Every structure is written in structure tokens, then in C-alpha cells.
Amino acid sequence: MKKNYWLRGLVTAIIIYIVLYCVLIVVDDFGLLFSLLSPGTWFIIGIGGVDAGTKYMVQLLTSVVIWAALGAFVGWVYGKIKSRKNIGTKMN
């Protein structure tokens, strides 16, 4: 059975992002930590002439997409490494 490690990584990264985002809301600290947690913040700096709600949605969506892509990539790499280890152990 083929395991989809990229999908596990994607879901795990989104869950981690949501948990950290909720912790920042509870702590009420939207300074440097928020900027580091939400890479989408850097994409909306150049958006001008739109209201704050639209900027917030763009920031949230880009951050989730970036975290999901990062998690999927890490899961994919993990799956490749794990499958190569399994091939090596079956040869012995």
C-alpha cells in the first residue's frame, strides 16, 4: 500500500499553522512573531488601494498556501527517503 506522505505533511502543516495562529490571537501579539508565522504578510505589502478586509484575506490565504506547500514538500521528501530505506532493507 502506497502511503501519501506529502498529503500527511500538507495536513500537518495546515494544522500547525492554525494552532500557532490561534495562540497568537490569544496572546494578542501581532508583531514580529506574526510576521514570521505568516509569510503571506510580505506579499500584501505591495497591494495598495484595497480595503483592510481584502488585504487580511489575501494574507491569510497566501500564508495557508505557503504553509501547505512547505508541508507537502517536506512530506514528499520524507516519503522518498523512507521508500529508499525500505528498498535497501529488502535487498538484504
Image (cartoon, rainbow, N blue to C red):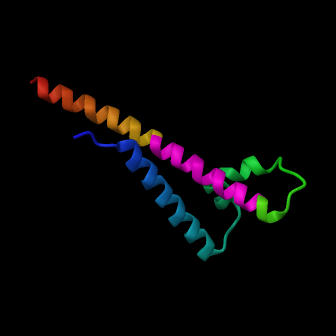
Q: Which residue is at the far top? A: 91
From the top left corner, tell me how far across and down residue 31 is, in percent.
Answer: 71, 63
From the viewer's perspective, is 10 left or right of 54? Answer: left
Compared to residue 88, the image places residue 29 above or below, namely below
From the viewer's perspective, is 62 left or right of 53? Answer: left
From the viewer's perspective, is 26 left or right of 31? Answer: left
Q: Main secondary structure of the magenta part?
A: helix
Compared to residue 69, the image places residue 58 above or below, namely below
For the point 40% across and 37% down, the residue is 76
Task: Look at the image and tell me in which quarter the N terminus lies.
Answer: top left
Q: Which residue is at the far front? A: 1
From the top left corner, tell me how far across and down residue 27 is, in percent.
Answer: 61, 74
- Tell how many labels: 0
Q: Which residues are magenta?
A: 55-72
From the top left corner, tell me how far across and down residue 9 is, in percent.
Answer: 41, 48
From the viewer's perspective, is 69 left or right of 76? Answer: right
Q: Which residue is at the far left? A: 92
Q: Is residue 82 magenta?
A: no
For the point 78% across and 60% down, the residue is 54
Seen from the viewer's position, the closer of residues 89 and 53 is 53
Q: Is residue 60 magenta?
A: yes
Task: Look at the image and tell me in which quarter the C terminus lies.
Answer: top left
For the point 12% across and 28% down, the residue is 90
From the top left corner, tell me how far across and down residue 28 is, in percent.
Answer: 66, 74
Q: Which residue is at the far bottom? A: 26
